[in-house]
Image: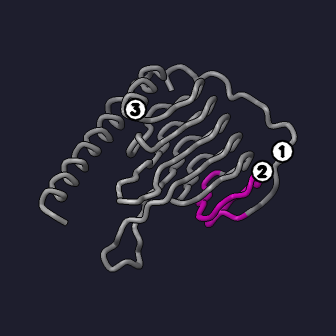
């Protein structure tokens, strides 16, 4: 890597860390949904109509996060959209009418513990429509969650989840099925001051 590439990489990292800090401490604690959405969109996040992120969200690299319509992201959720490596496939895509509860963590980047240099691994996370993810669940890089799936509270999802499947545990395993016939609900408006 040339000196010029190192300088560009360092400046890019400083910019991303500055944006992350501003979104965490400044924007994430503003008690008005419209203000938070404005700034998240300003910094590159795609947020569909009627969707909202509750207070205290931790956002990494909003440029690579896409949220569909009528989706709710709970308080103190973590969305890791990092896609910094060359040819990386990081980022997060979340569908329509999806309910992500408080303190859920969705990661698209982690370290390879088998790598001699502890290299980063970045892999996109895709979450379908009408998904429910319970409080404090963790979704790891590269996972696809099919439409209508339910992730139980506290589950650690390390592998893909099929549509309309209910999973729970550490690591998450199938524990049931959801009736997919009538999934047509709307999550409703965001609560004030959340």
The residue where tag 1 is placed is: 180
Residue nearest the viewer, comparing 160 with 188: 160
* Label placed on residue 28: 3
Measured Cα–Cα span from mark 3 to mark 1: 34 Å
Q: Earlier in the sequence, mark 3 or mark 2?
A: 3
Q: Residues within 10 Å of mark 1 (few under 14, many from 20)?
A: some
The residue sitting at 34% across, 72% down in the picture is: 118
Q: Which residues are magenta?
A: 153-173
- Characterize the magenta stretch by its predominant secondary structure: loop
Q: Is residue 143 above or below residue 190?
A: below
- x then y, percent, for residue 107: 48, 54
Residue nearest the viewer, comparing 102 with 140: 140
Residue nearest the viewer, comparing 20 with 123: 123
The residue where tag 2 is placed is: 164
106 sits left or right of 11 in the view: right
Front disc: 3 or 1: 1
Residue nearest the viewer, comparing 192 with 17: 17
The residue sitting at 70% across, 51% down in the picture is: 146
Q: Quadrant of residue 87?
A: bottom left
172 sits left or right of 77 in the view: right
- x then y, percent, for residue 43: 36, 33
């Amino acid at each position: 890597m040339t000196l010029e590439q190192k300088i560009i990489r360092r400046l890019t990292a400083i910019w991303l860390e500055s944006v992350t800090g501003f979104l965490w401490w400044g924007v994430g604690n503003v008690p008005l949904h419209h203000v938070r959405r404005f700034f998240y969109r300003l910094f590159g996040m795609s947020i569909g109509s009627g969707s909202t992120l509750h207070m205290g969200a931790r956002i990494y690299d909003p440029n690579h996060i896409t949220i569909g319509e009528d989706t709710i992201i709970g308080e103190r959720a973590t969305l890791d959209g990092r896609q910094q490596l060359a040819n990386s496939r990081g980022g997060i895509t979340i569908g329509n009418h999806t309910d992500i509860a408080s303190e859920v963590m969705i990661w698209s980047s982690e370290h390879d513990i088998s790598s001699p240099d502890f290299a980063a691994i970045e892999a996109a996370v895709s979450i379908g429509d009408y998904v429910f993810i319970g409080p404090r669940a963790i979704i790891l890089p590269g996972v696809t969650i099919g439409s209508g799936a339910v992730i139980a509270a506290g589950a650690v999802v390390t592998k893909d989840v099929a549509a309309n499947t209910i999973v729970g545990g550490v690591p998450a395993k199938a524990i049931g099925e959801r009736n997919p016939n009538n999934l047509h609900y709307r999550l409703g408006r965001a609560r004030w001051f959340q």
